[in-house]
Amino acid sequence: MIYLKSDAEVELIRISGQVLGKAHAEIAKRIRPGVTTKELDRVAEEYIRDNGGIPSFKGFNNFPAALCISVNETVVHGFPSKYELREGDIISIDCGVKLNGYHSDSAYTYPVGDISQEVRNLLIRTKQSLYLGIEKAVEGNRIGDIGHAVQSHVEKYGYSVVRELVGHGLGKSLHESPEVPNYGKRGQGVKLKEGMVLAIEPMVNLGKKNIVQERDGWTIRTVDRKPSAHYEHSVAIRKGQAEILTTFQYIEEVTANTSLMIEVNEATIA
C-alpha cells in the first residue's frame, strides 16, 4: 500500500533530513586515508543520537550499524569495520535518520584523496543522474519516467545500472511502497501523486550490471570488481517540481575546494 503524506508529515521528514544532512557532513570531515570505516560509523551514530534522532539502519532486519559503508566495488550494504581507507578509494555512505517518528534516507559517494579521472567521472555522472531522476518525480508522471531518466543518462557513457536494488517509498517506515527502479520505460509503472515520498537512489557500476552477495548476507559487490557509485535523496512528489527533503548542502560546504568535492550543476549535465 502506498501512503500519501500530509504537508505536516512531509515537513517532519524534511526536519529529519536536515539532521541527516549534517550527520553526513560530520562524516565528510573525517574521510581521509588511514581512517577506519568503523570510526565513521561511530561519529555518525553519536551525532544522530545527540540531535534527538535514531539511526534508521541500526537493527533494521538485524543490520549491525548506523551506516552502510561501501568501498570501491561494494555497491551497497557494506559493514563498517577495521578497514582503513586508502588513497584512491571511493566510499559510499548511506544513512537514515528517524526523528519524530519519520525516516529520512540519503547516500553520497566520496573520493579518498586522488582518484583516476575515469572513476571521478563515474561519480559525477551518477550524481547527475540522481537529479535527472528527481526532475521526473512530479505529479502525473510515472515511476518508469524516473528510472528511464537515470538509465538513459548513465548508459550513454557505457555504465550499467544495478537491477536487483531499487529506491523506495518512506515515511513512518524506512521502506514503503512503491519500489523505484533506476531503469525503466517512460510512461510505465505506478502513477505519481502529490504526497508520495520516495527515496531515489541511483546505483551505477563502471563495468557490468551484475552483482553478487557476500557470505555475510548483506554486502553487495560488482561481479567484475569494478567500482560502483551511489547517490540518494528523499523527495516529496509535488505538482511541477519535486521537493527534495534531504540535503547535500552541508556536505558541499565541508568539501568545497577539496578533492572530496563532486560538483554537479545544470551546466555539467550533458
Image: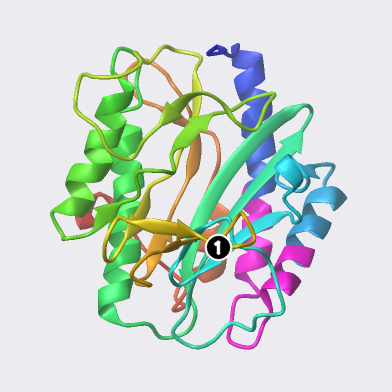
Q: Secondary structure at mark 1?
A: loop
Residue 270: tell me if it is visible. Answer: no
Give the dominant element type of the magenta stretch: helix, strand or loop: helix
Left or right: 130 in relation to 236: left
First to last magenta residue range: 21-42
Please name the residue shown 70% across and 73% down the image.
Answer: 81
Observer-nearest of 13 and 80: 80
Observer-nearest of 92 and 217: 217
Above or below, 139 relative to 18: above
Could you classify mark 1 by the number of other residues whose Cα lies within 10 Å: few (under 14), some (14-19), or many (20 or more)?
Answer: few
Please name the residue shown 73% across and 41% down the image.
Answer: 60
Please name the residue shown 28% across and 66% down the image.
Answer: 206
Can residue 39 be found in the magenta stretch? yes
- Quadrant for the N terminus in the image: top right
Left or right: 213 in relation to 52: left
Residue 149 image point, x, y percent? 23, 38
Above or below, 142 relative to 147: above
Residue 222 image point, x, y percent? 39, 64
Left or right: 65 in relation to 147: right
Please name the residue shown 64% across and 72% down the image.
Answer: 29
Which residue carries the number 1 mark? 214
